[in-house]
Image: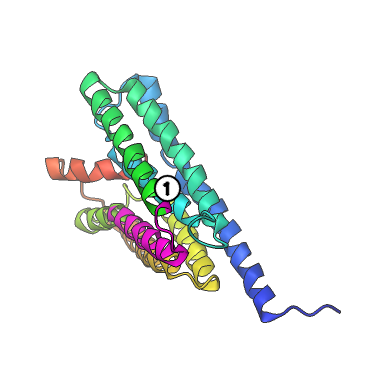
């Protein structure tokens, strides 16, 4: 009978959590597909915003670079999930540019060039840092800040649900995917003793739980009482733009 050491058990748990996180992330990456089906059918981007995809692309690129062997040891599953995410976001951006009106098209092209320029500066600049630990910490803080900033979108959703007392704009499966992916990578970071992974994903886990609790509360309430119509206002429409394809 072969007995496993504590280090081997941690390694197995870490890999299992990372693989699970990669799988659950697919639910997030495919969530905008209904939006782009609508865009392709109507041949226009309507009132949808392309900014969430720009932000997501930059975040995926930075986090993928953090997980690479040149920046951090034994974090390859962080690179794989974010590389896949970057491909999805790039496809969405290309589709958005294809069907956007001229003004939006030029703006999105400019932002796309800016994203790759910023990423190139980050990559080249980090490689000039000779000390590996300093390089790791520098990019680690950058990726952590990038991930935390991405949680602005769930905060908008949570605020919208509370204000409208409706879960119409917070799909259950998207919230569940967010919770499962964040929890998986939070555990991955804990097993790998990497605060740059478990801290932001711990925040994501908390926000995911919050969304699921709100969904359960307001969804059950809507079955008992007639739901009030959503107020159509400029501020509300701006918040809805952050929901990407969640309509």
User: Where is residue 132 shown, x and y percent of the image?
Assistant: 46, 63
Which residue in the rendered view is the most extreme toward the right? 1
Indicate left or right for 198 with 227 as reference.
right
> Image quarter for residue 90?
top left
Which span of residues is magenta-colored? 127-152
Residue 235 in the image, given as x and y percentages of width and height: 14, 45
Does residue 108 lie above or below 18 as drawn?
above
Q: Nearer the viewer, residue 96 or 2?
A: 2
Residue drawn at 24 percent across, 29 percent down? 107
Query: Looking at the image, which residue is at 20% across and 23% down?
Result: 103
Quadrant the C terminus occupies: top left
Q: Residue at x 29, y 23 (%)?
A: 100
* Lateral position of residue 174 relative to residue 218, left or right: right
**Residue 12 spot, x, y in % from top left:** 66, 68
**Is 53 on the left or on the right of 81, as rendered?**
left
Tell me if residue 15 is in the magenta stretch.
no
Closer to the camera, 238 or 80? 80
The N terminus: image quadrant: bottom right
| Residue 174 screen position, x and y as percent | 43, 50
Residue sitting at x 40%, y 47%: 123
Q: Disc 1 marks which residue? A: 60
């Amino acid at each position: 009978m072969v007995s496993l050491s504590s280090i081997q058990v941690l390694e197995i748990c870490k890999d299992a959590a990372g693989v699970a996180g990669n799988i659950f992330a697919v639910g997030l990456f495919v969530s905008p597909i209904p939006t782009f089906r609508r865009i392709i059918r109507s041949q226009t981007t309507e009132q949808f915003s392309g900014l969430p995809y720009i932000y997501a692309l930059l975040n995926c690129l930075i986090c993928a670079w953090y997980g690479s062997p040149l920046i951090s040891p034994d974090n390859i599953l962080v690179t794989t999930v974010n590389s896949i995410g970057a491909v999805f976001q790039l496809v969405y951006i290309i589709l958005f540019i294809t069907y956007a009106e001229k003004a939006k098209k030029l703006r999105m092209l400019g932002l796309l060039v800016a994203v790759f320029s910023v990423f190139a500066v980050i990559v080249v600049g980090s490689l000039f840092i000779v000390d590996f630990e300093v390089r790791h910490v520098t990019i680690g803080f950058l990726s952590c800040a990038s991930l935390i900033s991405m949680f602005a979108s769930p905060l908008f959703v949570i605020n919208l649900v509370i204000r409208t007392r409706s879960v119409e704009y917070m799909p259950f499966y998207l919230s569940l995917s967010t919770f499962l992916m964040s929890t998986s990578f939070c555990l991955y970071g804990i097993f790998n003793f990497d605060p740059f992974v478990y801290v932001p994903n711990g925040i994501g886990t908390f926000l995911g739980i919050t969304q699921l609790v709100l969904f359960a509360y307001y969804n059950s309430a809507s079955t008992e009482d007639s739901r009030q119509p959503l107020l159509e206002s400029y501020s509300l429409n701006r918040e809805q733009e952050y929901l990407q394809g969640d309509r």
